[in-house]
Amino acid sequence: MYYPFILGKAIAVSLPRRVVYFLAKIIAIIHCYTSPGDREAVEYNLSPLVEGREVLKKKTRDVFINFAYYLADFFRQSKLSPQFIEKHVEIIGLQHLDRYLGEGKGVIALTAHLGNYELGGVVTSMLGYPLSVIALSHRDERTNIFFDVQRRICGLKVIPIGMALKRCISVLRRGEMLAMLGDRDFSLNKKKFRIFDRYAYLPRGAAYFASKTRAHILPSFFIRKGRFDYKLIFEKAITHKINEKFDENEVIKEYIKVLERYLKKYPEQWFLFEKYWLLER
């Protein structure tokens, strides 16, 4: 996938955003209808979130389109400016972030494969909040470098998932901000949780880091609003007080409540192209 990414970036940075979106939408629709495996996986993942076969088909198609827009904006991150943020990003709940960072304990911005999580980190960094992000490595080292460069040129500090443990704890103990995804577990030590009356593997990293550092966990999302605008949302912390009786499972269950609310409201912006739900109920 390295060369398609290089080509995509070249096109995205050389054309106006509206033209890039137009091209991205065409490619997305072609992808949707010529990739039955991906389409089936998305329909399967959205099935607990939407009602009605026709609605499900439409939302599935919208996932492909919104993901293409997500990639277009990711490729264009080097063009991001304070003027873009002022014009296109509504910021909600920033006082929660300021409050918990002010305590000096560190903050875990826990998000999902929802909206434009990559751009959300960049915008947060450009607002003046030093941010470290945990990133899953790609099999192709060239692709890995491409993605990391895209993040670093926008001020993000990238922590490879294989080096996450010590570096994440250090970030939080310095009272800084750490972003991580909370809807899919890529580790070998998986644990299932109940969500939408089904089961799925959810990562336990955020709860673990919070228990070790007393950092607060803020559910945070960067949601597309219309076609060209976004909302950057910081929820209240789900760890108001951490003590010796800190319960990892209870923290994750609190996050699940928030995740269910956002997935139900924005199913067409949930970007998982492999089957998510476990068969057991």
Image (spheres, helix red, strand yellow):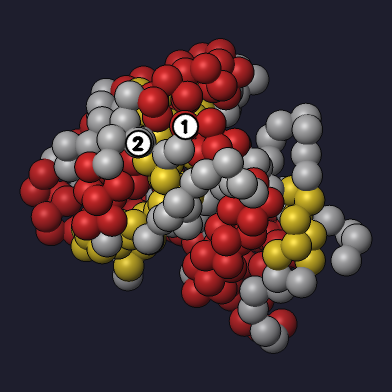
State which tag comes first along the sequence, 2 or 1. 2
Q: Disc 1 residue type?
A: Thr
Q: Residue 105 carries which label?
A: 2
Q: Which class describes the residues within 10 Å of circle 2: few (<14), some (14-19), or many (20+)? A: many
Q: In this view, does 224 lie to the left or right of 194?
A: left
Q: Which residue is drawn at 90% across and 61% down?
A: 280
> Taking 25 as reference, is 48 above or below it?
below
Please give the name of the residue rendered at 65% of the width and 74% of the height, measured from the top-left corner.
49
Which part of the image, by quadrant, shows the C terminus?
bottom right
In the rendered image, residue 229, in percent from the top left (x then y), is placed at 26, 62
**Relative to the observer, which residue lies in front, 197 or 51?**
197
Residue 9 in view (yes/no): no
Report helix, strand or loop for mark 1. helix
Residue 276 lies in quadrant: bottom right
Q: Residue at x 54, y 22 (%)?
A: 164
Say whether marks 2 and 1 touch (CB < 8 Å). yes
Image location (x, y in percent) of residue 192 = 78, 51
- Disc 1 target residue: 213
Q: What residue type is labelled 2?
A: Lys
- Marks 2 and 1, Cα distance to the nearest angstrom? 7 Å
Outermost residue toward the left in this view:
83
- Point out residue 166 in the picture as x, y percentages from the top left corner: 52, 17
Residue at the top extreme of this rendering: 141
Q: Is residue 155 visible?
A: yes
- Placement of the N terminus among the 4 image quadrants: top right
Left-right relation of 182 to 95: right
Residue 101 versus residue 160: which sits nearer the camera? 101
Q: Name the element at disc 2.
A: loop
Q: Which of 228 and 169 is in front in this view?
A: 169
- Tell me residue 271's x, y (percent): 56, 53
